[in-house]
Every structure is written in C-alpha cells, then in structure tokens.
Amino acid sequence: MDNSLVSGSLAMIQPAWHHVSGSNDHRAGELYQTSLMSALIAGNYEGQMTYGDIRKHGDFGLGTFNDLDGEMVGFDGMFYQVRSDGSARPVTDDQKTPFAVVTFFQPERELNLVQPMTKSDLLAMIEKATDANLFSAVRVDGAFDEVRMRTVQRQTRPFPPLTEAAKHQAEKVFTNVEGTLAGFRSPIYAQGIGVAGFHLHFLRQDKQSGGHALDYRLRAGKVQICTVHNLRVELPTSAEFLKTNLEDPALNQKIKSAEG
Ligand code: ZN
C-alpha cells in the first residue's frame, strides 16, 4: 500500500495533538461568567460588572458591553471591543458588561494544522479532542481564506430582545486574513447559562477589526485547547434582572438564531 495516498486522510482522522505542559497557573480551570445568556436573550443589556472586575478572573474570553455596544474578544490578557462599524479598540477597565465569559487560558494541547479546513471540519475535530460534558476554552491562530462575522449594534431603551436586536447586526466578510478565534465549547446542559456548543469571536491580527464568528475557512494555523472544570456565575442583583421572566420555551431556538 502506498502510504502517501493515505497519509492525508489519516492525519485528518488522527490529528497529532501535542500535550503542552503549561506554567500551572493556580487560577486556571475556572470559567467565570457574569449574568446569563438567557438574560441577554431577554434583553438585559445593562450590567454593573466592569471589565476591570472581569480581568481579575481571566485573561481570555468573550462577551459584550452595556447597551449591547459590540462584541468583546480577549486573549493574552488583552480585551478588545469590536463595534458595529467594524472598528476594534482595547477595552478600558471602567467599561461595563451585561454578559462576559472569561478564564485564565492555559493550553493543555495544541495542534498545528497545515491543511485547509471548513468551520464544520475544524469544529468536529475540536469536538473529538474535548469532553462534551466539560467546558473547553478554544483558541485558533491562523490564516483564513475567509471569515464571516457579525457585530451587534448598540441598543437604546426600551431594549428589544436579542433575537430582534440581532436582526440589525452588521455582518462583515474578510478574505485572506490572519487572526485569532477565541471562545468556548460548552456542554449541552449549559444552554441558557451560556451558549451550548461552540461560541467563538474573532480578532484580526492587526487588531483593527473582528466580531462574533459566524463562518470561516481556515487555511493553516494552530489550535489550542484548555479544559475547564469549574463554572462560576456571578448573577446580577439589579431590579431589572430580578423581575425578568426567564421562562422561555423557545430559548434553545432563540440562542441558536442569535448566537449561532
Ligand atoms: Zn458572540
């Protein structure tokens, strides 16, 4: 048998993940979140938590801003705000958020990819390498043939529900772009607390733009994953949150449509 004929497909089936022995940061392994995706879906766009507070709990993650003023993407201790005009800027400590998820990212395994992969191929491969019943932080640095992303638009009161606000989201497509996907794979039981499955945000390498990643084709890059065993959710105590009815039979569908 000619090995060269099968090596490509074998590599796909059995990707060569390398174990990374990190610095053993004692803060790693906890997912820290403010508020709930279900509250965001219901239109709770004003939180009391500042990004100065959020930073104490992680150097990596995603989220949004008060009034739903764009997408947050962060890694290596730097958080960025991508606004609906497509521009990105560093987040300041006094900015507040109604929803953010962070962790101290410590890669356990990494994989260098040299063959192009669609979003579904890439995510299927990461699914196989992570545990369905745990949370995983996922980082992909690479060259992309294409990245399609969206950015939510700043809302004013009375706040519409997220599915309504998302209808006016700005979409953008970058071709031939280098950058970083950062986010999480969350268990199915976490739907409503967060987003079940993958939730990834993108930042261009020049850090000038990005957004919530809708679709992408990776040309080559490095994937890093980090398992998270602890979930800590800081619930809001605002009157608005306390009186919000979070019973929503269509929640699953709404999260899929707003965050898919
Ligand atoms: Zn998002």
Image (cartoon, rainbow, N blue to C red):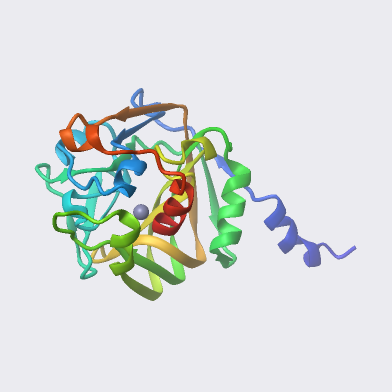
Q: Relative to 46, is 30 above or below?
A: above
Q: Position of residue 183 (x, y in %)?
A: 40, 48
Residue at the spot x=18%, y=40% of the render?
A: 47
- Outermost residue toward the left? 94
Residue 240, picture quadrant: top left
Q: Quadrant of the N terminus?
A: bottom right
Q: Position of residue 65 (x, y in %)?
A: 20, 50
Q: Position of residue 19 (x, y in %)?
A: 55, 37
Q: Quadrant of the C terminus?
A: bottom left
With 204 as the anchor, is 117 left or right in this view?
right
Q: Position of residue 243 (x, y in %)?
A: 23, 35
Instruction: Please tell me which residue lies in front, 228 or 75.
Output: 228
Number of on-image labels: 0
Residue at the spot x=20%, y=67% of the render?
A: 87
With 225 as the anchor, is 180 left or right in this view?
left
Residue at the spot x=19%, y=29% of the render?
A: 237
Q: Relative to 173, is 45 above or below?
A: above
Mark yes or no: residue 239 visible. yes
Which quadrant of the render holds ligand 1? bottom left
Instruction: Please tell me which residue lies in front, 117 or 54.
Output: 54
- Outermost residue toward the top? 26
Mark yes or no: residue 203 visible. no
